[in-house]
Image (spheres, rainbow, N blue to C red):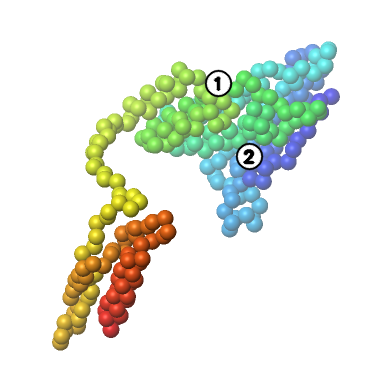
Amino acid sequence: MLTLRVAAAFSTEPFALDVDSTDRDGDGRDDVRLVVTQKPPCRTDPALVAQGCPTDKEDKSVSAQVVWIDRAAGLSRDATEPAASLGALAAAELGRSKRKQTAASVPRGVAQLRRLLGTLCAEGAASRLFEADGSMLRCEPLGTVVERLLVAEVQAALTEKDVERALAALDRDGWYFGRVPDKRRAELVKSVSADTTSVEPKVTKLAVSPLPRGNAPRPQPVGIRELRRAPGSDQRRPVTHRRAGLPSPWSPTPTSALGPSPSRLAAASAWRTWSSRAIARTST
């Protein structure tokens, strides 16, 4: 007897299970074939949530199988599954990625296969299937599946002349269940580079002078510009007032161990008094 535990599906990623007990090796004992079907994801549009689980017509269900053979010593799992059925699905997406008529549907197919991997395989750390002892089902080896899915994603983008999407797919290498081999990745990078145009950067050196710090002298303003209305006209013309001997409000006030210089404080006070009068004249 085979015992499995099944966790509830994620709210937007439903799946279904189907069990077949056909004798696969002809020894008179019932074997077990578990088919895991990842259904299309539910749309999350607020206006459609009340309808249950609305889906897009472009999304399709995908299935993989896990097989146990009943031997004299007990159930023995078929080591070729689910890697074989998953690999066949990935190979189909790879074939579609090379044709202009079907390349546009490849990103959805690849994403759906990765959802199936997440539901079924312990390698994704979020599997919904567990053995009787609570351990997740492992799907290894998955190297071929991971490689085919990435190649299909990159190739589909290149087929549609979308280099940015191809680069984005390459950047996500390693996010899902492992990385592709270095040799294969180098081939993908070369393929993407063949469809890109290299641009040499133009470097311009700018002369930058640092601002003075502390009590260093700074440029002084020449005065305050005031808008004055000309007699008999509604237009105002700028008038510049210059006052000698008044410190700039932006210049630092010299300080000593006992505090700011009294003479500079008096000059700054006079500057503020004159400025407030100039503003008052402007407003009137």
| Residue at 83% across, 12% down | 72
Pick the front one: 116 or 254: 254
User: Is 196 positioned to the left or the right of 237 in the image?
Assistant: right
Instruction: Judge from the rendering whether residue 60 lies leftward or rightward of residue 103; answer left or right.
Output: right
Q: In whole angstroms, how far apart are the C-alphas of marks 1 and 2?
A: 23 Å
**Mark toward the viewer: 1 or 2:** 1
Label 2 residue SS: loop
User: Does 30 sit left or right of 166 as displayed?
Assistant: right
Instruction: Determine whether 5 is above or below 52 in the image.
Output: above
Image-based side of 183 in relation to 201, left or right: right
What type is the residue that disc 2 sits on?
Lys
x, y percent for residue 63: 63, 31
Q: In which quarter of the image is residue 100?
A: top left
Name the residue at 70% across, 37% down: 16
Among the 4 quarters of the image, the one containing residue 278: bottom left
Image location of residue 84, percent across then percent down: 61, 21
Percent from the top left, x then y, of residue 86?
60, 26
Q: Name the residue under label 2.
A: 39
Q: Give the camera-side residue of 177 and 147.
A: 177
Quarter of the image where the C terminus is located = bottom left
Q: Sequence-wise, which precedes: disc 1 or disc 2?
A: 2
Q: Looking at the image, which residue is at 45% across and 17% down?
A: 183
Residue 144 - label: 1
Residue farthest to the front, as pictured: 258
The residue shown at (39%, 31%) is: 158
